[in-house]
Image (cartoon, rainbow, N blue to C red):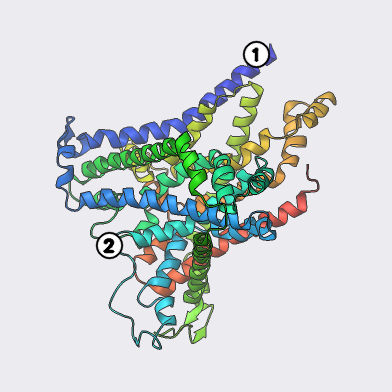
Amino acid sequence: MKTKYYNRLLKFILFLFTLIILSPTFIGFLGVLFPAFGYFPALGGNYFSLNFFNDLFLIPGIKKSLLLSLFIGFFSTLLALFFSQLILLYIFNTKIFYYLKIIISPLVALPHITMAVGLLFLLSPSGFIVRALSPWLTGYDRPPDFYLIPDEFGLSLILGLVLKEIPFFLLTSIAALEQFPANKLFNVGKSLQHSNFSTWCLIIFPNLYNKIRLVIFIVMAFTSSVIDMALVLSPSTPSTLSIRILQFYQSTETNSIFIASNLALVQVIIIIILMLTWKLIEMIIKHNYFFLFSIKFLPRKKYFLEKYFFSLGLFLIFLSILGIINSFFWGIGNNWYFPNVYPETYTLDHIISFFNENKVIILNSLSIALIVSILSIFIIIIWIESCDYLSINKPYLEFLIFIPLFIPQISLLIGLQTFLIKVGFQNYFFSLIFIEILYVIPYCLILLGPALRGINKDFLSIGASLGKTRIQRLFLIKIPLIVSTLLTSFAIGIIISLSLYTPVYFIGAGRITTLTVETLNLATSGLRQDLGVATIFQIIIPIFILLIVAYLNKKFTKWVF
């Protein structure tokens, strides 16, 4: 009898969690859909209409905005994936490979806006690269009157996204390589007289791709609709579609919310087009004729272009690190006049002053991130344990958790904010935590899910034979065995929450501000030194969190199974 009620309780919990995840997505979609079709009674839209769809292409520069979003989303994903695999194939089975995760973890931990700011400090007219070449090569004794960044075609935004996503693809690929016998397959390819490049393309990457396919689609959805990096690096006349949506949303004109909602729907369609295009390419590559062509086309000897592409990949990683270092110089430097490569003096006064003025913002950022990460871990553990107890093995249930990552943040959040305004809900802190959980849970699940499910069942059987209940086995056996992954997942949850901009902008509604929002405000204000200081905090906090987790892992992990 108790088991019957226990099963019902767990089913209810699973239903509740599913509702928590799906209801904001559904409400957000309706909140965009109705205004897109002209229905918003509060602004005089009492009837459904197609007028705004009919007028869509009359908006100045909208065609270029659409093409920019498609171009940036596709090529930033493709290039980041290409260079990440090229770096991997060159260092696979070397000593560097085993330390790669430690090397790139700080780059993965940094918010996207930090990478954008680092690139801005490097490529702007008064940036590090122009300073390093002046006046001995360029002849400039003052900043030149031209801009490399942002550019008209969105190339600087693609560069920024590639710099940020290469480490992410490297990290996920390393984790995927551990899930199949990559070493054996690599040796088989080499024994067939294939080069490293052809072995990787024909044997390793097809197996690896199946493991990271979901991650690729998540990255593509993000890069085509990114806001924070686009505000710094994208062209402004016109900008990408996500920025155009934001501009219409901020407009005081009566019809602006209808136009913004309309474009938000178009942004969803763009992501669908990109994914269908990628799927079409997959179908072509999977065809037998393509495979036979690849075997004949790919060189069995070392191809000279491999070396140059690999060097370019390493250069991109170096560029990321150089941008971060340059941000530190702007934060602690004093009296830094052009064309000096380094500041004349250094001081910590600006950092101390910024901290004193923004203590509340930093505390807000950390408290929200901690709460969001703890709740996300709690929900994942209950979800997995409930599914395991009820013997539910349906992949589509977990796919529901990833839905918010495939919908453009701006499209979803405009609808949610419209709904919150409509119902008069004004607890901004609670709303923000609830929405951020939707974006943090998927990443935590990617790490924590396989670890929880991969525990050796023999340990659990021994615990059960000793009379331990399911809850006791969870806390006394499962959690101690996965404590390292649990802590890492917790850290990733904090880092992702700290980096979120769009949820804070829309759901926080100006009442709640975080460090990421403040950094972006400074990036668009032109105050270089304050921006450098804010960027330092955005660099230090995630790295400090990773160091704490590394220490705790060493402290608590006593065995390895």
Q: Earlier in the sequence, mark 2 or mark 1?
A: 1
What is the number of the mark on residue 152? 2
Q: Amino acid at mark 1?
A: Lys
Q: Amino acid at mark 2?
A: Glu
Q: Quadrant of the N terminus?
A: top right
Above or below 47: residue 214: below
The x, y position of residue 185, in whole percent, is: 65, 43
Distance of mark 2 from mark 1, alpha carbons? 64 Å
The x, y position of residue 497, in whole percent, is: 51, 50
- Return the residue nearer the eye: 456 or 113: 456
Depth-wise, is mark 2 or mark 1 nearer the camera?
Answer: 2
Q: Across the whole image, how many numbered discs are drawn on residues?
A: 2
Within 10 Å of the Cα at label 2, are there few (<14), some (14-19), or many (20+) other Cα atoms? Answer: some
Above or below 277: residue 104: below
Q: Is residue 124 found left or right of 193 in the rendered image?
A: left
Q: Quadrant of the C terminus?
A: top right
- Return the residue nearer the eye: 348 or 318: 318
Residue 499 in view (yes/no) = no
State the residue position of label 1. 4
The x, y position of residue 345, in whole percent, is: 51, 86
The x, y position of residue 422, in whole percent, is: 30, 36
Q: Quadrant of residue 237?
A: bottom left
Tell me the residue at 68%/15% (across/down). Answer: 3
